[in-house]
């Protein structure tokens, strides 16, 4: 453990009498080790230690410490086992939903809890379940110590005074800030730093062109966003656009007025996120994968996106294509500008595709040659050179016989760690080292071509049903035309694009046929037994394929010679890589896995392939914990790239966030007695004042009536939302049970089904809402559908510009109208926010009896005898029979209830005379219509 971790723990333990605190660290300062040491300090005699809001990687990293044995409480664990864990006093991981239910049901005594550790505090809000838990714990035990942690300082400055609001909702007063530039942290990490080698790799000319074009398009989109005058101009910079949080910042500002924005502004927000990915993927993935991603963007966003129509957007697609292939005519004329810096291979159209070759010969003055470029990532070669250099240094060090060299060899395990962003990069780099970069690019190229064949086959399957829309194609924005529909040859752009598509499809067809032949050879037992080498069979197939055409034998021989030459070159390079210079054992690590790999592998050489601030800090702590170990770190940056700019800007943003937090800490206005102030139920007084308005001013003897606390029965599944927390803040007693009907029971006659906007759309799509409304109408007198909006978003389903003149059944308003028509007793309540919902519940419960927990749990649940309990006050009708009745001739919304009161079943209705029907239906005409319908003869086959 590093010394500044000891300082943090000592500060927390000294201030434990203050009730805990909020700790904010820089990213990568090993928060999991800090939590592990706090668990070690805990003693079971003090009570149980609860750990909340942990992610799976964080939980795994904490459990890697052999001295820690915290238990994990899940929903699969029975209630009795949970009670035994609580009383044992051990540390345990638990979800907030399970803990709040156990606290409300009193399975967990508040007095048996010693402290609570809350991770990822930057994700908490004032209405979160964690704040609900802390309030209940502090209300019964003011000695409970609450400690919250976060290693995302930039997220802690998002919004207005977020750190201060978190301190208030968690009922704590202390704020601990530990940035990288803190004195203790900098001394520990800079006392014996690792040896660092900063390598700047120049990007290829096409990569530079793509990066420049993307930045120009992003700048153009930002200028369009500034014209709306609805976003803070200071945030709209290209540097901020490099980070993932940029999209969240813009959406946070626009969410309250989202319904007033036009389609173009909404699309610009989405386009900025897409452009951010384009910059990130440019330095992360290979050329073929990047082109494939661009193709998918063009196919998916060609109609909606704004950035595709920007002035520089065509350069992105053009340069990405040139990194992979060129197309040339056989007479030497170029369809596109060829590259001169990369060695290429040539592939001609196969003669097996006769109609394509004839069309190309006619339209392109002698055909088209597909020239494969397959530009390799510049970092691949540098990575190989680094590994060879590391192995050479170790061999040189092993030859020395001095004592220092022997000691260093004993401490060196020979493992080299290569750190990347994702698993895809790790797998690809592993293939580059074990085989060759050219082979990896060849594999990606073949996958790309095969996907072209699959996509080209899609329109042919439904040729009569699917029209050819503009923008469906991959490279040209149009569906490839069949020979009968192909336009005449010309030098226009459309014909060039069509020829490129045909060339790609021809190459893809050749590869797919060759793959099928190889599969047949492998699966044929006679060939496998008769021929020891598969190469002979493949060679025979190639020779037979070369003899198909006799018109251009000379050109085919030339291409065959070029192909053989390239194969020889590839073989020699591969042999040099494998048998030439040896490389050390390499382990690849992906940041997205979240594992602490340094303490497990203990590498002596680390290659940071994709720079990351958090991982850099982990390397520094790893070296500080192992001062005698020689660690060499290689950083790979693309020179003058957004990769460097993003890394440097990330450090500046983190330092700026801590400076802002330091200023906030000096100006915070927190109550002296935070716990007493936070537990004050001001809403109780408000409820009392509102209830007194309805009371008589005359009281016998001036006696005060006993205050009765409101009770609300809440379904267990509703604790995933924040509404139970807000209801508890309003002074209501929350009773968690498992309900079969409804989400909230306010009184014996009122049942509420709560729906958020997202859940409402999903319930309509699945049909679940119809069943829920039917059950509520069957068992309760007043069924209520609560539609709850988010406070920071617009209070509307759609903007006025999106409302059409025509009524469509798929519209959400149409679906709500049909629901209200099917269930006339269903009350629809609209709520602006969680706090508005709490006020609505308080008003609905006014002068009503409190709900019965035992009866609420029995509703809709059959007993042992199979009998289902019904509410006697509810209208217990057969809803299917009612729906059938309302569809009969002469039955309207004004008379169907009278018919239901006058007869008990449809069979009885069919036997009623016309006079009785006229009396119930309110007219002779309606009665005659119904009687004629019931007595009409139906046709038979006889």
Image (tube, rainbow, N blue to C red):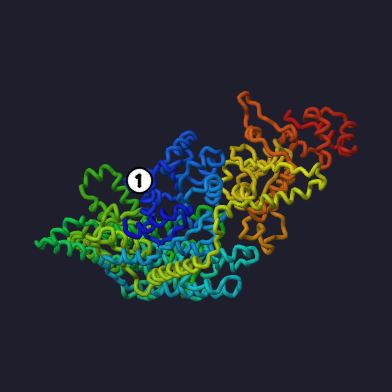
| Residue 721 can be seen in this image | yes
Residue found at the far left of this picture:
401
Question: Residue 323: horizontal and vertical position, in percent?
Answer: 37, 69
Side of 861 relative to 324 (left or right): right
Count the labels in the image.
1
Q: Nearer the viewer, residue 113 or 660?
A: 113
Q: Is residue 553 visible?
A: no
Which quarter of the image is occupied by the C terminus? Answer: top right
Location of residue 687 in the rendering, given as x and y in whole percent from the top left corner: 70, 50
- The residue beneath circle 1 is 68
Q: Give the residue at x 31% y 72%.
A: 200
Q: Residue at x 72, y 58 (%)?
A: 806
Residue toward you, 923 or 164: 164
Q: Quadrant of the N terminus?
A: bottom left
Closer to the camera in the image, 617 or 728:
728
Q: Which quadrant of the figure has residue 503?
A: bottom left
User: Residue at the spot x=46%, y=75% of the render?
Assistant: 491
Q: Secondary structure at mark 1?
A: loop
Is 185 or 889 nearer to us in this picture? 185
Q: Position of residue 88 (x, y in %)?
A: 42, 38
Q: Is residue 807 left or right of residue 678?
A: right
Left or right of 930, for residue 665: left
């Amino acid at each position: 453990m590093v010394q500044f971790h000891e300082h943090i723990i000592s500060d927390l333990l000294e201030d434990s009498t203050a009730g805990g605190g909020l700790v904010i660290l820089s990213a990568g300062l090993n928060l999991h080790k800090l939590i592990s040491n706090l668990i070690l300090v805990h003693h079971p005699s003090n009570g149980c230690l609860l750990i909340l809001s942990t992610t799976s990687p964080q939980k795994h990293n904490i459990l890697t410490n052999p001295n820690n044995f915290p238990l994990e409480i899940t929903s699969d664990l029975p209630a009795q086992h949970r009670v035994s864990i609580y009383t044992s006093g051990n540390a345990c991981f638990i979800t907030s939903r399970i803990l709040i239910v156990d606290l409300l049901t009193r399975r967990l005594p508040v007095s048996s809890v010693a402290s609570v550790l809350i991770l990822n505090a930057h994700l908490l809000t004032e209405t979160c379940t964690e704040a609900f838990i802390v309030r209940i714990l502090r209300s019964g035990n003011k000695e409970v110590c609450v400690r919250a942690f976060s290693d995302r300082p930039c997220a802690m400055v998002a919004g207005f005074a977020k750190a201060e609001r978190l301190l208030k909702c968690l009922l704590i007063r202390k704020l601990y800030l530990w940035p990288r530039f803190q004195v203790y942290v900098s001394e520990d990490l800079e006392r014996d730093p690792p040896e660092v080698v900063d390598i700047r790799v120049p990007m290829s000319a096409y990569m530079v062109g793509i990066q420049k074009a993307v930045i120009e398009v992003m700048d153009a989109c930002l200028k369009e966003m500034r014209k709306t005058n609805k976003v803070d101009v200071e945030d709209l910079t290209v540097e901020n656009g490099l980070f993932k949080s940029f999209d969240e910042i813009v959406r946070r500002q626009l969410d309250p007025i989202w319904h007033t924005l036009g389609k173009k502004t909404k699309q610009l927000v989405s386009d900025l996120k897409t452009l951010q990915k384009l910059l990130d993927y440019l330095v992360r993935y290979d050329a073929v994968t990047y082109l494939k991603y661009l193709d998918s963007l063009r196919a998916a966003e060609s109609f909606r996106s704004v950035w595709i129509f920007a002035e520089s957007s065509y350069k992105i697609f053009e340069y990405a294509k040139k990194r992979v292939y060129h197309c040339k005519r056989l007479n030497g004329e170029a369809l596109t500008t060829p590259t001169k810096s990369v060695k290429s291979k040539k592939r001609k159209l196969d003669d097996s595709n006769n109609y394509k070759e004839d069309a190309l010969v006619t339209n392109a003055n002698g055909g088209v040659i597909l020239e494969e470029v397959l530009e390799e990532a510049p970092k691949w070669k540098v990575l190989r050179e680094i590994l060879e250099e590391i192995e050479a240094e170790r061999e040189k060090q092993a030859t020395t016989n001095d004592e220092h060299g022997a000691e260093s060899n004993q401490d060196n395990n020979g493992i080299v760690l290569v750190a990347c962003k994702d698993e895809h990069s790790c797998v690809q780099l592993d293939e580059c080292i074990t085989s060759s970069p050219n082979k990896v690019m060849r594999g990606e190229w073949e996958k790309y071509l095969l996907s072209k064949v699959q996509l080209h086959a899609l329109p042919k399957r439904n040729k009569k049903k699917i029209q050819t829309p503009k923008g469906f194609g991959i490279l040209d924005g149009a569906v490839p035309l069949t020979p009968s529909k192909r336009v005449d040859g010309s030098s226009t752009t459309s014909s060039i694009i069509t020829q490129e598509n045909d060339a790609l499809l021809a190459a893809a067809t050749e590869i797919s046929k060759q793959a099928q032949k190889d599969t047949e050879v492998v699966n044929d037992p006679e060939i496998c037994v008769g021929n020891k080498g598969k190469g002979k069979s493949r060679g025979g197939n190639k020779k037979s394929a070369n003899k198909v055409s006799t018109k251009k034998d000379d050109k085919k021989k030339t291409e065959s010679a070029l192909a053989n030459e390239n194969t020889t070159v590839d073989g020699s390079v591969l042999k040099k890589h494998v048998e030439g210079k040896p490389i050390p054992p390499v382990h690849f690590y992906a940041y997205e896995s979240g594992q602490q790999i340094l303490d497990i592998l203990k590498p002596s050489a680390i290659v940071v392939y994709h720079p990351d601030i958090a991982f850099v800090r982990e390397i520094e702590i790893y070296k500080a914990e192992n001062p005698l170990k020689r660690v060499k770190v290689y950083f790979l940056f693309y020179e003058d790239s957004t990769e460097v700019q993003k890394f440097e800007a990330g450090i500046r943003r983190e330092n700026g966030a801590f400076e802002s937090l330091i200023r906030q800490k000096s100006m915070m206005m927190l109550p002296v007695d935070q716990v007493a102030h936070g537990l004050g139920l001001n809403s109780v007084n408000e409820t009392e004042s509102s209830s007194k308005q309805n009371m008589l001013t005359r009281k016998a003897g001036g006696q005060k009536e006993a205050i009765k606390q409101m009770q609300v029965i809440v379904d267990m599944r509703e604790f995933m939302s924040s509404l139970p927390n807000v209801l508890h803040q309003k002074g209501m007693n929350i009773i968690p049970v498992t309900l079969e009907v409804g989400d909230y029971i306010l009184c014996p006659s009122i049942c509420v089904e709560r729906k958020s906007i997202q859940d409402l759309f999903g319930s309509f799509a699945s049909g679940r809402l119809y069943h829920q409304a039917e059950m509520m109408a069957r068992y309760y007198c007043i069924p209520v559908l609560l539609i709850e909006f988010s406070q920071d978003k617009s209070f509307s389903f759609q903007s006025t510009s999106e409302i059409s003149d025509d009524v469509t059944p798929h519209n959400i308003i149409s679906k709500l109208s049909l629901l209200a028509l099917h269930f006339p007793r269903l009350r629809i309540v609209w709520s602006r926010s969680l706090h508005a919902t709490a006020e609505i519940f308080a008003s609905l419960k006014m002068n009503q009896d409190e709900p019965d927990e035992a009866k609420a749990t029995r509703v809709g649940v059959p007993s042992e005898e199979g009998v289902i309990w019904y509410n006697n006050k509810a209208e217990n009708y057969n809803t299917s029979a009612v729906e059938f009745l309302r569809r009969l001739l002469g039955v309207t919304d004004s008379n169907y209830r009278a018919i239901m009161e006058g007869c008990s079943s449809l069979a009885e209705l069919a036997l009623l005379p016309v006079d009785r029907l006229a009396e119930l239906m309110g007219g002779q005409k309606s009665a005659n219509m119904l009687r004629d319908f019931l007595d009409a003869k139906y046709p038979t086959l006889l």
